[in-house]
Each structure stands twice: as structure tokens, then as C-alpha cells.
Image (cartoon, rainbow, N blue to C red):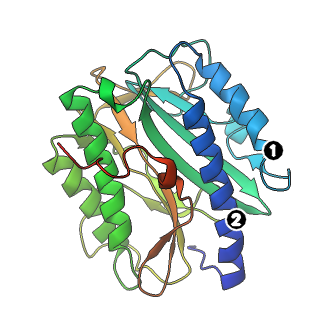
């Protein structure tokens, strides 16, 4: 069942989303060469306690046994990277997936950043980030009541494919609300005119997961970390959004501090 939220519930989701966007931005700002991914997790856990009224809880820690407060996926790691002793190097692509509960509702968002800044990107990895971010932004701009979910899924796939990259097919976006993962699943591929019709009050986590090379992935022996089979890098961007009467509202507006806000679509 796909939940449709009341105006009061959407207000609560705006609060949760804003808090998780602030936490994501703080974690991104913390990233620098020479730190370990475990240090990022410790920073996330400590910072979460300082936000809002202090009652927010990580949505990752303990979820189906996941051992950390966020997912930190580096280079060939697509999603669900477990923080540990991996040392971040200048030029690494790092995807930070931050989610949590606040006053009974979830905020869920992800950014992929470059350790040391975008000046350390080569042309292929710049294209990967541009294509992934573009697919998210254009998907969100296309959301409105009355269209099929498949229209959004198809749009993401088309933008990624035209950009010379591939979408991960085994993992999807999802509905979001009082639970981290709700109906409907939102694949990053599909056919227009298919799937559920969007209605005002639905809340969705749109999250393109994109590989620079082939789409094939595998899960490491830790049971969580998903990596590209060809070892090439991946990128991951995510917003939680609400369907309004004529558009989508981004509930996790992390873009305000994004250095790519003005030039992320440039070649």
C-alpha cells in the first residue's frame, strides 16, 4: 500500500528532511584526505545528537543488523559501504547516505562528493557525477500528480544511458514516511505509462545509483557493501520528495551547500 500523507504529516517530514539534509552536509564538510571512513561514522553519530531537539535517531544503525550510523561508499563501492579503516585519498569519490527518524518520520538523502574538491576529477568521473545528478534533478522536476511512476523511472534510465553510463538494476528507490522503506519500489529504469499513478501527498525517495562502466554488481562478503564488478567507480544521489498539487517538493534540501550547484551540468 502506498501511503498518502496529510498536510500535518508533510510538515513533520519537512522537519525530518531538513535535519537529515543538515547532517548530510555536515558529514560532507567533514570529509578530507587522510581520514578513515570510521571517523566519518563517528562524526555523524556525534553530530546527530546536536541537531534539532536531540531526539533524532539514525535510520541506518541497527537496521537489519547494519553496524553504522551512515553508509560510506568509496569509488567502486556503489551503496551500503560499511565505515571502517579505509583511508580516504584525494580524488576519491565518496557517496554518503544519511537517513534518520525525527518526531516519527524519516528523512533519507545521499550525495557523492570528491575528496579534495571537484578539481581532482578526470573527465570520465566528472561525466559520471554530472549524469547521475542530472538524472535525479530532472526526475524530480518531472514529478506531479497524475503521471505514472514508470514515467519517472524511464526518464532516469534515459538520461543515464544517453550520458554513457549504466543504472544499477538490483536496488531501487522507495516510498518513505514513518518507515525507512515503504511502497512503492522505485527502480531507476522502466517504461513510461506503467506503474502506480502519483497522487498529492505521496512521499518518495528518488535515488539514481549509476555506474561509470557496466551495470553488473556484486555484494562483498560483509553482506552489505555493493561494488561494481568491473571495478570502475559509481555515484549515488538521493532526495526525499513530496508530491504536491502541481510539482514535487524536495524534503531533504542538501543542495544549498553543494559546490556543484552552479556548474554541475557543465562538461
Residue 58 visible, this orientation: yes
What residue lies at 34% left-to-right and 49% top-to-bottom? 133
Q: Are marks 1 and 2 in contact (CB under 8 Å)?
A: no
Q: Nearer the viewer, residue 231 or 241?
A: 241
Residue 37 in the image, given as x and y percentages of width and height:
59, 21
Q: Secondary structure at mark 1?
A: loop
Is 121 displayed left or right of 11 in the figure? left
Above or below — where is 267 with respect to 148? Answer: above
Res 127 label: none
CA neighbours of label 1 inside 10 A, class few (<14), some (14 to 19), many (20+): few
Q: For mark 2, what is the residue?
A: 15
Instruction: Please state, as top left, top right, bottom left or bottom right, where the N terminus lies in the image.
Output: bottom right
Residue 67 visible, this orientation: no
Q: Secondary structure at mark 2?
A: helix
Q: Quadrant of residue 107?
A: bottom right
Q: For mark 1, what is the residue?
A: 50
Residue 194 in the image, given as x and y percentages of width and height:
30, 73
Residue 186 in the image, given as x and y percentages of width and height:
42, 59
Amino acid at each position: 500500500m502506498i501511503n498518502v500523507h496529510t498536510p500535518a504529516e508533510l510538515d513533520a517530514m519537512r522537519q525530518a528532511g531538513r535535519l537529515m539534509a543538515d547532517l548530510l552536509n555536515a558529514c560532507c564538510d567533514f570529509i578530507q584526505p587522510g581520514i578513515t571512513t570510521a571517523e566519518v561514522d563517528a562524526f555523524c553519530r556525534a553530530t546527530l545528537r546536536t541537531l534539532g531537539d536531540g531526539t533524532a535517531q539514525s535510520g541506518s544503525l541497527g537496521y537489519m543488523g547494519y553496524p553504522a550510523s551512515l553508509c560510506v561508499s568509496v569509488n567502486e563501492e556503489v551503496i551500503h559501504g560499511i565505515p571502517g579503516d579505509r583511508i580516504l585519498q584525494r580524488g576519491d569519490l565518496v557517496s554518503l547516505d544519511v537517513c534518520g527518524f525525527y518526531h516519527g518520520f524519516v528523512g533519507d538523502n545521499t550525495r557523492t562528493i570528491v575528496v579534495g574538491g571537484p578539481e581532482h576529477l578526470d573527465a570520465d568521473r566528472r561525466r559520471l557525477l554530472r549524469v547521475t545528478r542530472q538524472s535525479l534533478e530532472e526526475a524530480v522536476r518531472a514529478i506531479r500528480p497524475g503521471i505514472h511512476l514508470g514515467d519517472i523511472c524511464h526518464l532516469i534510465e534515459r538520461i543515464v544511458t544517453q550520458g554513457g553510463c549504466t543504472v544499477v538494476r538490483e536496488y531501487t528507490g522507495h516510498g518513505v514516511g514513518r518507515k525507512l522503506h515503504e511502497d512503492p519500489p522505485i527502480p531507476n529504469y522502466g517504461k513510461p505509462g506503467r506503474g502506480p499513478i502519483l497522487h498529492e501527498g505521496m512521499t518518495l525517495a528518488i535515488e539514481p545509483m549509476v555506474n561509470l562502466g557496466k551495470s553488473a554488481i556484486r555484494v562483498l562478503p560483509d553482506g552489505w557493501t555493493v561494488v561494481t564488478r568491473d571495478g570502475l567507480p559509481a555515484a549515488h544521489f538521493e532526495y526525499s520528495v513530496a508530491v504536491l498539487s502541481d510539482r514535487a517538493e524536495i524534503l531533504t534540501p542538501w543542495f544549498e551547500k553543494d559546490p556543484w550547484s552552479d556548474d554541475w551540468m557543465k562538461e
